[in-house]
Image (cartoon, rainbow, N blue to C red):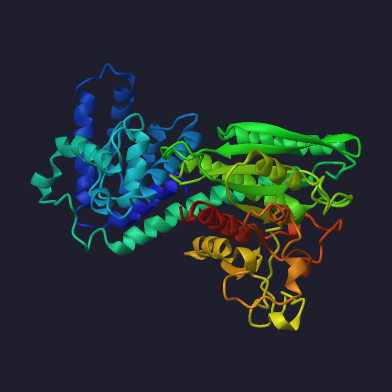
């Protein structure tokens, strides 16, 4: 949702409302302000725009004002500010609701009142240098004080803390939904770009094609660094050749307690493929999820009792699968040898293939009936019963308020058929089990569901990026939602 769409909502909301006159009164205030300093080029331009104000509809007013304020980098600027506003409010949304609904703002030819969270967005656009100085509530109040010049309350009998029939909880829900949608659009776009880059590497990024592996690892490292995370390479030799993991670290802003290091949660995905195929689901989808998790962590800076290590692994696929030359084995072993406390490991592995067709989710064994859905529209959280407590904690945090159905395997007191013993360990997380660390896999059930597994048809057009976005959003909630 861009700025124009946001304002359209505001305009439609106020049309015909008794306070519509406030918009036009605000314009008069702006004109008076411009008249006070006609030597200013912007004010002179503004006056030219406002000369015909009496003939314009409310929509025409806003259109003219927006054009007046148009900047070359407007889209980038608005996107950056919008994200900042969303993040400022997402942890304090409810308690600031009454402040937000009373927000008014003005600057450079724009004045508006009572437009809920959209007002915060617009206010931040025009007062971007000031927003974030004091905190959400104080900043909203600051915007209000700026608007007292227009003394709306006295002239219109307007209560700045608006009546419920004007800005209602329904509006609140609507705008909160818009914010979430905006964030998901950005996430979905990024996921597609990541998968597109990886699947277009030629030759395929398998263990025999060093240049393609280097391009993939460089892409991961560059993005980690772009997000502001410290990055390093972990190298080892396999069959006389050097391979590397790409490792980044998110350090929680929470102050350390005592001298003991904070436990580490590992989040990883392998970037190599099996054979000569694009590897969209296996495993570009998972690398994309890893990169977006890193971006969200760096941007939102969650206050956690643990730090997070993000790892792009090499050599998960044959011929190294199951060996000590797998990148995940190298990484797990290094943590063990260094005595680093590990909270657990989350493995992204094939998260992009879905279907709504009845019977689209095969069951490898009849014992899974009733435990696993028969429609392939869900994402799995898959682990071993031995680590049931960890699995359950992550599953609950991921599944809470999730847009996509989350199915847990390996939860406490859950039936665990023998057929699952091998299936639940078929990725990088299994190497962490070897060193006694809890670990699980976020997975679309791989070859059980996806007919393109390890085939040249595992291409980007087979992926469902809408559900993939939902899966990553939910996985992020699990990653930052583990108990202390």
**Residue sitting at 48 percent across and 64 percent down?**
400
| Nearest to the observer: residue 437 or residue 470 | 437
Question: Residue 337 at x, y = what percent?
Answer: 68, 41
Q: Is residue 107 visible?
A: yes
**Residue sitting at 46 percent across and 43 percent down?**
300
Question: Residue 345 at x, y = what percent?
Answer: 62, 52
Q: Is residue 191 visible?
A: no
Position of residue 135 in the picture relative to residue 362 (left or right): left
Question: Residue 52 at x, y = what percent?
Answer: 29, 37
Position of residue 462 in the picture relative to residue 339 (left or right): right
**Residue sitting at 29 percent across and 18 percent down?**
40
Q: What is the residue that sits farthest to the top in this orientation?
A: 39
**Residue sitting at 86 percent across and 49 percent down?**
320
Position of residue 16 in the picture relative to residue 428 (left or right): left
| Nearest to the observer: residue 482 or residue 83 | 482
| Nearest to the observer: residue 149 or residue 164 | 164
Where residue 383 sits, quadrant-wise, is bottom right
Marker count (numbered): 0
Position of residue 417 in the picture relative to residue 454 (left or right): left
Question: Residue 340 at x, y = what percent?
Answer: 60, 42
């Amino acid at each position: 949702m861009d700025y124009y769409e946001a304002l359209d909502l505001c305009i439609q909301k106020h049309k015909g409302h008794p306070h519509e006159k406030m918009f036009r009164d605000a314009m008069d205030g702006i004109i008076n302000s411009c008249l006070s300093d006609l030597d200013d080029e912007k004010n002179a331009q503004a006056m030219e725009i406002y000369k015909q104000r009496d003939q314009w509809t409310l929509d025409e007013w806003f259109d003219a004002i927006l054009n007046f304020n148009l900047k070359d980098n407007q889209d980038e600027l608005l996107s950056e500010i919008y994200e900042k506003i969303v993040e400022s409010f997402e942890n304090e949304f409810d308690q600031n609701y009454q402040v937000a609904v009373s927000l008014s703002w003005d600057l450079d030819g724009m004045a508006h009142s009572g437009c809920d969270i959209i007002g915060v967005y617009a206010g931040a656009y025009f007062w971007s240098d000031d927003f974030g100085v004091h905190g959400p509530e104080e900043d909203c109040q600051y915007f209000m004080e700026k608007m007292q010049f227009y003394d709306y309350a006295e002239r219109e009998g307007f209560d700045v803390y608006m009546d419920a029939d004007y800005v209602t909880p329904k509006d609140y829900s609507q705008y909160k939904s818009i914010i979430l949608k905006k964030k998901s659009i950005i996430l979905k776009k990024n996921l597609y770009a990541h998968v597109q880059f990886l699947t277009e590497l030629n030759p395929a990024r398998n263990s025999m094609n060093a240049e393609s592996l280097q391009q993939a690892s460089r892409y991961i490292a560059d993005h980690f660094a772009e997000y502001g995370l410290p990055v390093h390479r972990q190298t080892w030799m396999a069959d006389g050749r050097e391979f590397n993991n790409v490792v980044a670290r998110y350090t929680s802003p929470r102050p350390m307690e005592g001298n003991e290091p904070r436990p580490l949660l590992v989040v990883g995905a392998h970037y190599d493929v099996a054979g000569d195929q694009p590897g969209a689901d296996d495993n570009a989808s998972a690398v994309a999820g890893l990169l977006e998790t890193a971006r969200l962590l760096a941007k939102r800076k969650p206050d956690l009792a643990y730090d997070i290590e993000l790892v792009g692994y090499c050599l998960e696929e044959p011929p190294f699968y199951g060996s000590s030359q797998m990148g995940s084995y190298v990484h797990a072993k290094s943590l063990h040898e260094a005595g680093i406390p590990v909270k657990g490991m989350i493995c992204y592995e094939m998260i992009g293939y879905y279907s709504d067709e009845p019977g689209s989710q095969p069951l490898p064994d009849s014992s899974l009936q009733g435990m696993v859905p028969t429609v392939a529209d869900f994402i799995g959280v898959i682990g071993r019963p031995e680590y049931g407590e960890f699995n359950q904690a992550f599953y609950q945090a991921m599944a809470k308020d999730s847009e996509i159905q989350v199915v847990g395997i390996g939860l406490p007191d859950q039936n665990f058929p023998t057929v699952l013993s091998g299936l639940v360990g078929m990725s990088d997380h299994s190497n962490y089990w070897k060193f006694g660390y809890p670990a699980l896999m976020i997975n679309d059930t791989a070859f059980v569901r996806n007919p393109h597994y390890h085939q040249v048809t595992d291409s980007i057009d087979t992926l469902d990026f809408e559900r993939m976005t939902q899966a990553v959003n939910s996985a992020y909630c699990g990653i930052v939602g583990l108990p202390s």
